[in-house]
Image (cartoon, grey):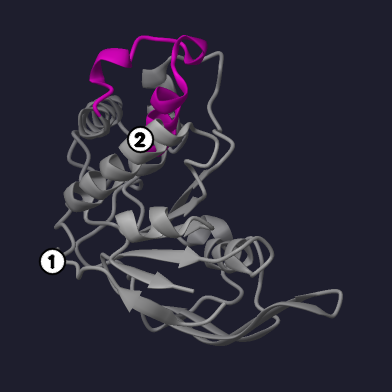
């Protein structure tokens, strides 16, 4: 994994201003603030990762700009997912330093990084309807019911699944399920959004549709996104910048 190799377009978006407040006037622990303690600008400084002495990532130097959609492109085994896992805190670097803004993140656990992830395998709860799946993370964090309902409706509207909120997961198509998974991640308003080949299990026509949807979603939510793929066409279709 090396640094950015090409630029497709540049991001024109500034981070949204968000208010940390619940309907009852008390602070909302699930909401981001206007001045986050861990900003989404990210820097890898000579980061390496080895497994049992076998290098997976070697000397990675890379900056991810606040609010951009960066694609990590490469074949299987090149270190893309390992790099994503280090961003998520699921793996710690063997060497080098990883920064979110000015904060060293090497040893910061995943739950303190304010990130959301979407994988190829869609992680949804089949016993819950779409509405409950989307709002699950907020509900478990004791967010006010009105906040859960408002944010669920907001992201459902962004994803175009507002008419599906009462359905069960088994009643959805593959593309609808992937939209629900993205909504489930977005509803928390994370500072960093990680996507590990989320469209690879979809058919070609649906993949193209979801790429277009992702670009539109990124423009609306203005969140820093890192997307992993082995598909050059997919990378060129969605990326602000591509790292190879």
The location of residue 35, given as percent across then percent down, is 23, 68
Which mark identifies residue 178? none
Q: Residue 133, relative to residue 100: is it above or below?
A: above
The location of residue 234, given as percent across then percent down, is 40, 53
Residue at x-position 52% and y-position 75%: 105
Magenta-span inclusion, residue 197: no
The location of residue 205, given as percent across then percent down, is 38, 32
Q: Residue 136 or 198: which is nearer the viewer?
A: 198
Q: Residue 162 or 29: which is nearer the viewer?
A: 162
Which residue range is magenta in the image? 160-183
Q: Residue 242, relative to residue 170: is it above or below?
A: below
| Labels 2 and 1 touching (C-beta < 8 A) | no
Q: Residues within 10 Å of mark 1 (few under 14, many from 20)?
A: few
- Please name which of the two marks, 2 or 1, marks the residue nearer to the observer: 1
Q: Which residue is mark 2?
A: 183
Magenta-span inclusion, residue 170: yes
Q: Earlier in the sequence, mark 2 or mark 1?
A: 1
Q: Is residue 59 left or right of residue 144?
A: right
- Indicate the secondary structure of the residue bearing disc 1: loop
Q: Is residue 84 left or right of residue 147?
A: right
Q: Is residue 76 left or right of residue 162?
A: right
Q: Which residue is mark 1?
A: 12
Quadrant location of residue 51? bottom right
Q: Residue 159 or 200: which is nearer the viewer?
A: 200
- Indicate the secondary structure of the residue bearing disc 2: helix
Residue at x-position 47% and y-position 41%: 199
Q: Residues within 10 Å of mark 2 (few under 14, many from 20)?
A: many
């Amino acid at each position: 994994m090396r640094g950015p190799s090409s630029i497709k377009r540049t991001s024109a978006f500034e981070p949204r201003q968000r208010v940390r407040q619940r309907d009852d006037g008390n602070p909302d622990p699930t909401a981001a603030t206007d001045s986050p303690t861990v900003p989404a600008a990210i820097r890898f400084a000579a980061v390496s990762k080895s497994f049992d002495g076998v290098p997976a990532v070697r000397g990675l130097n890379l900056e991810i700009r606040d609010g951009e959609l960066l694609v990590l492109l490469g074949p299987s085994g090149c270190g893309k997912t390992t790099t994503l896992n280090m961003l998520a805190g699921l793996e710690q670097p063997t060497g080098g330093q990883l920064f979110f803004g000015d904060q060293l993140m090497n040893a910061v656990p995943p739950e303190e990084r304010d990130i959301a992830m979407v994988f190829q395998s869609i992680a949804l709860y089949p016993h819950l309807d779409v509405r409950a799946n989307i709002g699950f993370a907020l509900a478990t964090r004791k967010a006010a019911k009105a906040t859960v309902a408002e944010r669920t409706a907001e992201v459902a509207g962004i994803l175009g699944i507002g008419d599906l909120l009462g359905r069960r997961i088994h009643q959805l198509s593959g593309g609808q399920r992937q939209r629900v998974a993205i909504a489930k991640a977005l509803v928390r308003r994370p500072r960093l959004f990680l996507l590990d080949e989320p469209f690879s299990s979809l058919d070609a026509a649906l993949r193209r549709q979801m790429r277009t949807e992702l670009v539109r979603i990124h423009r609306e939510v203005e969140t820093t996104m890192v997307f992993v793929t082995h598909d050059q066409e997919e990378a060129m279709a969605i990326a602000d910048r591509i790292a190879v």
